[in-house]
Image (spheres, rainbow, N blue to C red):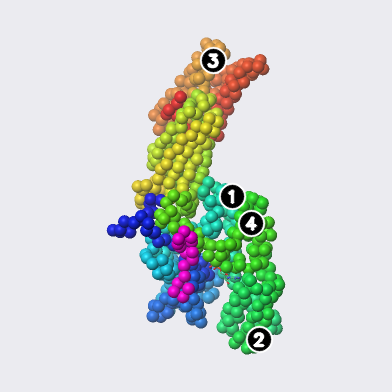
Amino acid sequence: MALLQIAEPGQSQAPHQRRLAVGIDLGTTNSLVAAVQSGSAQVLCDDSDIWSVPSVVHFNADGQVTVGVAAESMQTDALNTIRSAKRLMGKNAEDLEQSWLNEHYRFDSTSGSLPAFITAAGNKTAIDVSSAILGTLKTTAESSLGGDLVGAVITVPAYFDDAQRQATKDAAALAGLQVLRLLNEPTAAAVAYGLDNDGDGTIAIYDLGGGTFDISLLRMQRGVFEVLATAGDTALGGDDIDNAIVDWLLEQAGLESLDDEFARSTMKAAARLAKEDLTDKHETVIEWVDVKPGRADTLTRDDFNAIVEPLVKRTLTPCRSVLRDAGVDREDISAVVMVGGSTRVPLVRERISAFFERPVLTNIDPDQVVAIGAAIQADILAGNKPDNDLLLLDVTPLSLGLETMGGLVEKVIPRNTTIPIARGQEFTTYKDGQTAMSLHVVQGERELVTDCRSLARFELNDIPPRVAGAARIQVLFQVDADGLLTVSALERESGAAASVDVKPSYGLSDGEIEQMLQASMDNANEDMQKRALQEQLVDASRVLEAISSALTSDGDEYLSGDERAAIDRLVEKLQAAMQADTANADRNAVQAAVQALEQGSEKFVERRMNASVRRMMAGQAIDELETTLARTNNNNSATDSTIDSSVSG
Ligand code: ADP
Ligand code: MG
């Protein structure tokens, strides 16, 4: 939180002064900006009372840039009127070849790595186009809110990769807009509905826009949204409905096709109006105006439904596949949110509600819901609501983990994990009777603690004394929306708990992060060897520990003098193999000595075991039997990681 409370230079914030931050839905078809005002999030209008800005930019030879409705009216100048630039964000020349944009515009894909639209005003990349749209929204916001913005939360599709997200950030920077955070569109929609406050559950976000369809499954857990699965169709949306209506009109008029592109776009515009009309009405009249003066057709809701039906059906396949991918049953979905202008079509709502077997959420305008969620996030990030917990979809730049026996690192959250994130792992004790554990939180990619960055240490006390490896310590790593790491440890049986908070990114520059990554790559091989050796040494100590404690307690009872001496010699041999300067010890020698000791003490272990069984049969000491078994098992396999006990009870 503190990190994002940026004060304007030379200006300290008055107690009640709100910091102006907005949420922006940078859509393929339409873009909009929203802000929280007097406690509620609202979409902002420009001077002409328009809130939904068509994502269309016109460039003319004088270098004049026109955005939105005004640009749409210039569509006769097709090559200079760029739409759907979002489809090209973060894409390269190869991707472009498969895109329909390639058929509608002229491109320069030779200069540099970014393909650019060739316009009257020169080459324009998708970043330039998006930047023009963002600039317009910024102006709208600043004049509507009456001040300078501290920043914006901009939404992106959940499936956007790093390059696409970076391109979005670049576009914002070019427009002079500070990005507080990029937020996934489905997450923004869930936030708008306050589903982050509704407790844990799985949510489906159905987004049918102008030219794209996305379905996402989100899991809400402990205040954190996680995208479980996404699917969709990048060539399915309201545009297809408009085209289908035009085809229907042609059929009514007994025509094969329309004369020209202009006639087609006129009829498409009429079709779109009719479609919107049918949201509330049961029929509407479509006039052919200049295309066939005097002709008009009546489109009823039933006819319209028949036109839309196959398109809605096509969206169900991705819906099924996200459920399958996430391994979620329909009954387990706790809410279904409708997003995108095309979900205003009543049949869409009906069919999706039937598919998920529950009412769908529509009370927030589906065109606005994403921008509204983004505005709520922006308001929190700007520091206007300091005590609210918030969501973030950033990534951990370096792995986070715990030190385990032998100075090794057990990575709990790998690098590049989207945050916020919560991940748990079970650890266990190393020594018999161990009642305390020292937890060392580290950051980095290397295998040994000495090569990583130490973040924090803390202790878990009051662990019930058990045999080594029997205690179950649940360690939870949580990185919150602001990158703050909380590590907590819990021993369930006793309820013993402890935790620590750290800011892993504190004091780390991008350069240092890069250096750490480079070092891990350079040393990968050597690190693996070191790790294998350390693991072998840990295993050896565990065997030594178990045998020595067994020898102390009943060595005299079950072993003859010679047998005892033989085991003692094997113990010494192993100790010698281990002691050769640990860093340079010979792993194979240690392994051989461990095996020799295990074999040499087999009889002893067997006799102790039999004695335990006999005692148990006599109705005694079940605990003792468990102890023996646990100890034997431990010698062979260690499923959990053991944490060093610098403090043992
Ligand atoms: P995107 O996210 O792709 O930018 P939007 O969510 O803004 O798109 O949706 C735009 C689409 O919604 C357009 O195809 C538009 O015609 C359609 N749309 C808007 N209002 C309605 C309505 N009342 N009925 C049907 N479709 C609508
Ligand atoms: Mg959208």
The Cα atoms of the two marked residues, 3 and 1, are separated by 54 Å
Q: Nearer the viewer, mark 1 or mark 4?
A: 1
Foreground mark, 4 or 3? Answer: 4
Vertical relation: 347 (above or below) 540: below
Residue for badge 2 = 295
Q: Residue furthest left?
A: 10
Q: Earlier in the sequence, mark 4 or mark 3?
A: 4
Instruction: Tell me the element at label 2.
Output: loop
Work out whether 118 lies above or below 35. Answer: below
Residue stretch rendered in magenta on the structure:
34-49
View extreme (bottom): residue: 293
Which residue bears the numbered disc 4?
321
In primary-sequence order, the first of circles 1 and 4 is 1
Which numbered disc, 3 or 2, marks the residue that appears first in the sequence?
2
Query: Which of 43/306 is in front?
Result: 43
Question: Measured along the vertical axis of the image, is residue 100 above or below residue 75?
Answer: above
Q: Please, is residue 430 above or below residue 66 in the view?
A: above
Going from the N terminus, do you reach mark 4 or mark 2 first?
2
Q: Which residue is mark 3?
A: 554
Asked whether 36 falls inside the magenta stretch, the response is: yes
Residue 230 or residue 197, whichever sits in front: 197
Callout 1 amino acid? Gly
Q: Which residue is mark 1?
A: 201
Percent of width and height locating residue 519: 39, 46
Do residues under tags 1 and 4 come within 8 Å of each other at their CB atoms? no
Q: Position of residue 198 (x, y in %)?
A: 56, 51
For marks 3 and 1, the one nearer the N-term is 1
